[in-house]
Amino acid sequence: MTSSSQSAIALTATQAAWLAELGIDRKLLATLADTSALFASARIAPGAGVAPVNVPSSGQETPASKRPDAAVGSPPMHRAPVQSVAQKLAATQPVDATPVQPVRRVDLPADLALLAQTVAGCQACGLHASRHQTVFGDGQTSAPHWMIIGEAPGDHDDHLGLPFQGKAGELLSTMLAAAGILPQASVFYTNLLKCRPKGGRTPRADEIQACLPYLQQQIALVRPSGLLVLGWQAAQALVGQRASLDQLRGQVHRYTDRGVDIPMVVTHHPASLLLRGQYKAAAWQDLHLARAALAA
């Protein structure tokens, strides 16, 4: 942050509204050189608060029970209207008995462009039958500061082939900017699933099992400095623990796999925050925790 910004913090109207909703006054912000001081308790003590992570293998299932934070679907950065809330909260459908052929990581390309082509032709689960196109990812592909990982593409993502479209994505961009992560940081955006579940329903365990190796390969090839994971199912899949989002958030995990060892913070999906505004303060703290983890 520059010296000129130490006397005042420039906010857009959207960012100011976000902070006002958290009870943070613009006049108070103007006295602060760094908004993260508002949540100093979220910073990481040296050597503390780090939870090691064993990356699950492609054959390990993630439970398909109901999600506590309802964070499915469309996430950032852009413009088009998001799919309806009712669709995002649709109950999990019965699991198809058809056996899944898990993607073998040893068969995946070691080149990101070739990996995207492989994903585009994937038929490892039933989602390929209803998709318009796969949603591989978007953003800085070479050692970005952050890889931000949602759960599954939304309707507009499915049509445009880009992640984090619509209102949830706009909210995410506002949150990242207000927390001081954007616009300075380079970011790559992606999802746990590369195809949209029909009707915006909750992803099933077999679908996650089939798609997780693609995400793991993306992380290995993109090599971000940190991971910000949005939503319960994405968090469970990457942390490798059967736990609620409340149990997983508020700490810094370590993602360790094939020479990659990076900090990982999980928080609420912005689609969930559109429904449950009371979680926004917790998400704000998580963003500052993530920023502190990268600075440590």
Image (spheres, helix red, strand yellow):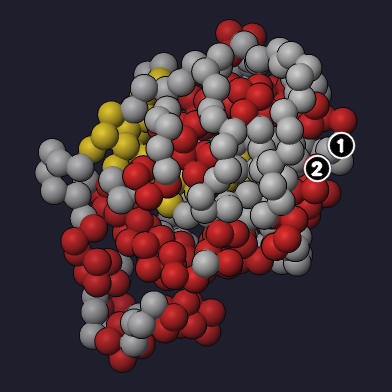
- Quick check: can you spot residue 4? no
x, y percent for residue 177 = 46, 67
Residue shown at the point (33%, 61%) measured from the top left: 285
Relative image position of residue 112 (x, y in whole percent): 62, 27
Q: Is residue 36 above or below residue 10?
A: above
How packed is label 2: few (under 14 Cα within 10 Å), some, or many (20 or more)?
Answer: some
Cα gap from disc 1 to disc 2, whole angstroms: 6 Å
112 relative to 186 in the view: left or right: right
* Amino acid type for the residue under numbered disc 1: Ser
Disc on res. 279: none
Name the residue tied to disc 1.
Answer: 130
Q: Which residue is drawn at 87% across and 30% down?
A: 129
Farthest-out residue, left: 46
The residue closer to the viewer here, 27 or 201, is 201
Q: Do the residues labelled 1 and 2 touch (CB within 8 Å)?
A: yes
Q: Quadrant of residue 81?
A: bottom right
Percent across and percent down for residue 135 are: 72, 40
**Quarter of the image where the N terminus is located:** bottom left
Q: Which badge, 1 or 2, comes first in the chain's sequence?
A: 1
On the image, numbered disc 2 is attached to which residue? 198
Q: Residues within 10 Å of mark 1 (few under 14, many from 20)?
A: few
Q: Name the residue rendered at 49%, 71% in the picture.
A: 277
Q: What element carries label 1?
A: loop
- Residue at (40% x, 37% y) in the render: 243
x and y, in percent, of residue 282 in the image: 37, 62
Q: Residue furthest bottom?
A: 27
Which amino acid does the dot numbered 2 rest on? Lys
Between residues 254 and 9, which one lies in front from this camera angle?
Answer: 254
> Could one spot residue 59 in this view of the protein?
yes
180 vs 170, left or right, is: left
Is 247 located above or below residue 94 in the figure? below
